[in-house]
Structure formats: C-alpha cells, structure tokens
Image: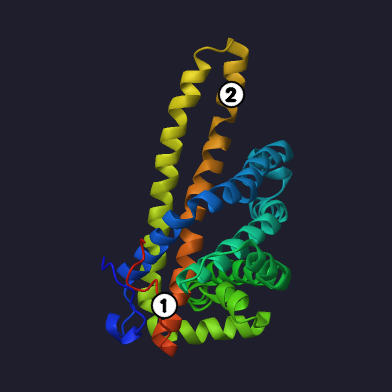
C-alpha cells in the first residue's frame, strides 16, 4: 500500500470495493489486537464457553424434553440471555474504536466509554431485532431473511456513530446499503468464510497444547480436560471470528459512507500503518 495519506475520496474511486473493506478490517485488527483480543476473550469467548456448559446442563442434547421446534427457540433464548449483553458491550467498544481509527485518530477509552453509555442499549435492541427478523424471514421464506440481513448490515455502526434511534438506524442502514446489496452480500460471505477458517485454525492450534498438557495429567483429569475441549475450542473460534467480523462491520460502514457522502480519512490508502 502507499505510504502516503489520502484525504480526497475521489483518489480511491467511487465504487464499493470488497478488497478494500477486507484490507480495512485486517488493518484495524492488526493495529488494535492488543486491546481487542482481551476484550473478546472476556466478552465473547467466556460467555460462549459458559453458554455451552449451561446448554449441556439444561439438557440441550435431549431437546429439553420439548418438541424440536420448541427446543430450538428455548435454546436460542438461553443463548441470547447469556451472550447478548456482553456481546453488545464488545461490539460497541470495538466499532467505536474502529471508527475513530478509520477517521485517522487514536481510539481512546474516554471516547469508547462515552459511546458505551450512549449507545449500548440501542445496539442491544438493534442486534436482537436483526436476529429475530432475519431468523423469521429465513424460517418463513429464505429471501426475506437474506434481504433484511443485508439491509440492516450496518445498523449498529449507524447507531454508534450517528446516534440515531433504533428505527432510524435500521432505515439509515437500508439506505446506505441499497445500491450495493450484492457486493455487501459477497463481503459478508467472505467474512463468514474467514471467520470459519479462523475458528478452525484456532481450534487446531488449541488442540496441540491441550493434548500435550493432557499427556502429563492423571487419567481422570485428562478425561475431564478432553470432555471440555470442544467447548473451549468453540469459544476460541468465536473469539477469532469476532476479531474479523466486528471490525469488518465498521469498515463496511465507513466505505458506504465514503461512497454516499464523500468522506475521506487519513486511513483510506494506508490501512496497515
């Protein structure tokens, strides 16, 4: 990439470029991993691990003693209750910092804390609405679910940066993405595949030290450790995925605003510095 700073948006084109957004996302992750990784472990990985233990204790393998469809919604409600609030805090913190970074500044805890106070409740409501509406659309008919998923793809960054209300953020997101839905779909699929790959690699890397440690433990302790390995692996995978998808959402919003409103940034051409 160029060593210079591009402040004129016209210098980098007027089309939504998936490659550029992916570069933004990875640049953000590399510049801020020291802060975001511990946050993700605490607010994404740990709740995911606790959720897996809770679902196991509640009898998810036996469908809670309920019909399959009812059991699915009970499991989903439990998952939302355990992971929604910490996940909301993580998403708000990372997107706030990512947007400050993309604007050419340095993310500060003071600004992030202010965004947490102002926006966390809206982010939580928007996230739950997106989840429920997309799920309902997919259950009833696949296409409406996909359309809502794409239309509301950047509603959370809108709520944080523009301080819009819940409905206003959803409408604003739909307007920003309207002319770019197919490219947004391609980008989201890429982020999904990268997240799956990151989770797989993290799980493989985790398996080696766990196996090595287990070799020196008594058989009962080793069996217990192996019992929890899948849950630990799933939590590590969620952490790896969050460090791609959340900065990616901020980068996508930044790119859509650049196209729609001609915003520039000192980070536009030099995403890795």
Q: Reading the chain from its start, which is encountered first: label 2 or label 1? A: 2
Outermost front residue: 4
Quadrant in the rendering for residue 87: bottom right
Cα separation, mark 2 vs mark 1, equals: 48 Å
Determine which of the numbered discs, if any, sits on residue 225 in the image: 2
- Residue 108 at what x, y percent from top left? 60, 64
Mark 2 vs mark 1: give the one in front: 1
Q: Residue at x 45, y 45 (%)?
A: 199
Quadrant showing the C terminus: bottom left
Q: Nearer the viewer, residue 186 or 265?
A: 265
- Residue 254 at what x, y percent from top left? 45, 76
Q: Residue at x 39, y 60 (%)?
A: 27
Q: Is residue 163 above or below residue 232?
A: below
Q: Nearer the viewer, residue 106 or 252?
A: 106
Q: Is residue 17 above or below residue 211?
A: below
Residue where numbered disc 1 is placed: 265
């Amino acid at each position: 990439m160029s060593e210079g700073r591009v402040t004129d948006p016209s210098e980098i084109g007027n089309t939504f470029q998936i490659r550029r957004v992916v570069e933004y996302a990875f640049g953000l992750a590399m510049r801020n991993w020291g802060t975001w990784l511990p946050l993700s472990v605490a607010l994404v990985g740990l709740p995911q691990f606790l959720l897996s233990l809770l679902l196991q204790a509640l009898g998810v393998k036996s469908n809670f003693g309920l019909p399959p469809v009812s059991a699915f919604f009970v499991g989903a409600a439990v998952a939302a209750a355990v992971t929604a609030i910490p996940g909301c805090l993580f998403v708000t913190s990372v997107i706030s910092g990512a947007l400050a970074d993309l604007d050419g500044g340095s993310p500060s805890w003071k600004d992030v804390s202010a965004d947490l106070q102002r926006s966390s409740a809206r982010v939580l409501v928007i996230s739950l609405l997106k989840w429920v509406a997309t799920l309902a659309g997919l259950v009833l008919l696949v296409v409406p679910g996909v359309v809502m998923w794409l239309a509301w793809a950047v509603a959370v960054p809108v709520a944080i940066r523009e301080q819009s209300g819940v409905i206003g953020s959803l409408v604003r997101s739909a307007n920003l993405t309207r002319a770019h839905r197919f490219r947004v779909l391609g980008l989201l699929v890429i982020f999904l595949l990268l997240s799956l790959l990151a989770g797989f690699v993290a799980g493989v890397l985790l398996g080696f030290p766990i196996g090595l440690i287990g070799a020196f433990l008594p058989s009962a302790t080793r069996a217990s450790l192996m019992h929890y390995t899948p849950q630990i692996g799933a939590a590590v995978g969620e952490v790896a995925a969050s460090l791609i998808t959340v900065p990616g959402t901020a980068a996508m919003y930044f790119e859509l605003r650049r196209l729609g409103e001609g915003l520039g940034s000192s980070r536009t051409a030099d995403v890795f510095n």
